[in-house]
Image (cartoon, rainbow, N blue to C red):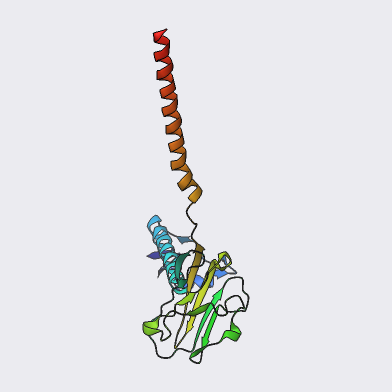
Amino acid sequence: MWIQTGERRHRGLRATLLPDCLLGGVWSSTCPPVHLSLRDVMEVLTSCLYGAVLGLAVLGLTSAGVSTDVTFREKEDVVLPCKVPKTSGLRVLEWKKDGLGSDYVFYFRDNSALESFQNVMYRGRVKLQDPQMTDGNMAIVLSNPSLSDAGTYTCHVATDTETTQTVRLRVEEPPNLGLAVGLPVGLVVVAAVAAIGGFLYVRAKKNGSTL
C-alpha cells in the first residue's frame, strides 16, 4: 500500500516519515497531506480487525481454564473432577470454594492431605478419588453433600507448571412425588365420578320412560 505525501512516497503506514509528522497525536501542519484511496482504507481496517480478533482469541485461550458442571443429590457422595497431564513432580493441590475466603476445601502438600488448612465444614468429608493420583487424576470425593455445598469450586495444581480448573456444583431437584402420585389418583376419581354419573343418568332415563 502506497501513501502519497507530497513529493515523496512511502511504503505502508509504518513509514519512518509519519511519526515525525505526528506531534502529540495531531498531524503537523508543516507536513503535506496524506491521500489514501478507498482500497488503502479497507486494507487498514481489515488489518486492525484481524489483529483485534486474534488478540481476543489468544487472550481467551490463555486465561480461561477448564470448566465443568456437576449435579448431585443430597446425601449421595459426589465427585468433583480435576485432571491434569501426568506428572511426578506435584508440589501442591488446592481445592477452594467461592465464599470460603482463605480456607480450603482440600489441601494436599508434601504427599499428604493437611486438614489444618481445611474449612471446618469439609473436614472428614473430602478425600482424593484416587489416592495415587494416577494419570493426573486430582478429583476429590465430597461425602454427605447438602444444599450449602452447592457453588463454584476451583482446583489448582502446581507442578513444573500451574493448572486451574473450575467445577460448578449444583443440586439436582428431587422429583415432585405429590404431582406424580396425585395426577393418577385424580384421573381415577374423575373417571369414577363420570361412570357413576353416567349410570344414574341412564337409570333415571329408563325409569322416566316406564312411567
In the rendered image, the quadrant that contains the N terminus is bottom left
Q: Position of residue 141 (x, y in %)?
A: 47, 75
Residue name at image x 39 percent, y 9 percent: 210
Residue 196, compared with residue 111, is above or below; it is above
- 40 or 185: nearer the eye? 185
Q: Position of residue 149 (x, y in %)?
A: 56, 68
- 205 or 45: nearer the eye? 205
Q: Residue furthest bottom?
A: 110
Q: Position of residue 209 (x, y in %)?
A: 39, 9
Q: How many marks?
A: 0
- 123 or 135: nearer the eye? 123
Q: Is residue 140 visible?
A: yes
Residue name at image x 40 percent, y 90 percent: 88
Q: Which quadrant of the view contains residue 96?
A: bottom right
Q: Is residue 32 visible?
A: no
Q: Position of residue 99 (x, y in %)?
A: 61, 70
Residue name at image x 40 percent, y 55 percent: 38
Q: Which quadrant of the view contains residue 130?
A: bottom left
Residue 137, compared with residue 88, is above or below; it is above
In the rendered image, the quadrant that contains the C terminus is top left
- 166 or 202: nearer the eye? 202
Q: Is residue 71 left or right of residue 114?
A: left
